[in-house]
Image (spheres, rainbow, N blue to C red):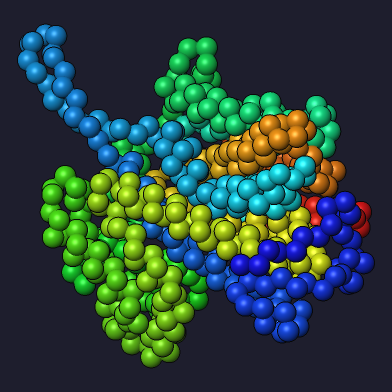
Amino acid sequence: MNSVHKPPSNSTLGVSSILGHEVCESYLLFPGETALGDALRTFLYFLGLAYCFIGLSAITERFFRSMENVVKQTREVVEIDPHTNSTVVRREKVWNYTIADITLLAFGTSFPQISLATIDALKNLGDLYAGGLGPGTLVGSAAFDLFPIHAVCVVVPKAGELKKISDLGVWLVELFWSFWAYFWLYIILKVWTPDIVTLWEALLTVLQFGVLLVHAYAQDKRWPYLSLPLTRGERPEDWVPEEATSYKHVDNVDDEHSRIIQIDENFERGIVDIFSIHSGSRTGPMYHNVPASDLAESSNELHALSLWKEQFVDALMLESAQTKKLGNIYVRALQMLWRLLLAPWRVMFALVPPCQIAHGWIAFVCCLTFISGIAYVVTKLTDLISCVTGINAYVIAFTALASGTSWPDLVASKIAAERQTTADSAIANITCSNSVNIYVGIGVPWLIDTAYNFIAYREPLRVQNAAGLSFSLIVFFATSVGCISVLVLRRLTLGAELGGPKPWAWLTSIFFMLLWIIFVTLSSLKVSGII
């Protein structure tokens, strides 16, 4: 693949740069792309970017199910009863709720941003200036996580249904480290070593992720002196309840590979599961799956191969058993068209083993691998869009790239808000993802670049357009106060952060989206040199 042209690093691209820029001679697949014209090329690259984002959403659904199986894993514990001196055998869960939310859920759904930033850092290895896509995307992703994802989750519960955070102490710890992450970033860029990142600053950034894990675990276990004296509310024994009250589970031999199909109450509401289209049925949503028994433990290799085979068979089918039952010919045709459009993704992701194998770990790793590959293609497309249009790479990072790579966060939080009886994981995924974005998503790429520059040149890493990035952090802080204040107000008045009367839920959702628009607009104008 031909190297992608980059805008000059020593200039801030404004309106004049958008209207008049150098001809982009780079291409994605073949040299003939350069003869298509800038307008057509921009349209095609944005179309490809959107298709990649659809793929990210699709693989996230499988990732979430693999993670459910990982969290369900238990181990056998043998104890001696001190009173009877008899042997007691019990099973306990391997994963702690809080650690699972931070590491598996938040890290996994943030993997597109982490991969993108790491790839961007490797591409710029040896340069004295850090790449612009990584930091810009991660700050923009933080705003997308905090505002649009909260906006979606708050309206997910049914009318009147309330879902609240059961462990406020853990949420406050996660919230603190989330805000501190971006305050720490501002200190590095504008206070401590302005416009420069040193090796020690990058190392401290990464190490703070470990501190977050320890502090959150200490709060969950209520360790003395390290935890807030807040009681924990009721929460389900399982991370995702086996029988969610709002879903009906049905076993289907035609779909025994356990793909989750959600059929919502009406077609007009849009698409939730990327592998299906909502029908016009008003019988309520359904999930079709197989029992959660671990195939590795049962040693049923034939059953495992059967499940895997069914994934490929289903990927090539244009109609499912549920679609054939639909009476509306137009809905069936639309369903078939949608499945045909997604056929490449469906066939590719059929390579992911069933999540019941090996406690879901193999599927978990495979999903992260696919996510990383898609993120690589996204970086190429984004560089080309910036090259063809002349738009500042930071503007694209704040807007399209941040929204697209944060789509897995949105899907995971929405699923958690739907399937869990509390709001803990849905909201924890938002706050923890923001922490992971800085401590890992920016920390690791900066550590790679600063270590290389220190060894090769004895020079620190310089940050392009640090002023624009710092301004975006200030805007993010200001709008975040409004978001968190509304969540606290909902807790005090309605008793829960998510759900409630639909008019109030939609009003909250609109307010969150307005905050996001303010952030994107001001940040884009600043990095473009307009304000």
Quadrant for the C terminus in the image: bottom right
120 sits to left or right of 213: right
356 sits to left or right of 42: left
> Can the viewer see residue 172?
no
Query: Which is nearer the eye, 400 or 280?
Result: 400
Residue 285: where, in percent of width, then height? 36, 66
Residue 449: where, in percent of width, then height? 67, 39
Q: Residue furthest top?
A: 83
> Can the viewer see residue 452?
yes
With respect to residue 383, does 226 lie above or below? above
Query: Which is nearer the eye, 352 or 278?
Result: 352
Residue at x 70%, y 53% (from the top left corner): 133
Residue 383: where, in percent of width, then height? 70, 63
* Residue 237 position by quadrant: top left
Query: Which is nearer the eye, 255 or 159?
Result: 255
Residue at x 72%, y 79% (from the top left corner): 34
362 sits to left or right of 118: left
**What is the total number of numbered labels drawn onto the structure image?**
0
Residue 251: where, in percent of width, then height? 20, 64
Q: Residue furthest front?
A: 456
Quadrant for the N terminus in the image: bottom right
Residue at x 41%, y 55% (from the top left corner): 367
Residue at x 37%, y 50% (from the top left corner): 364
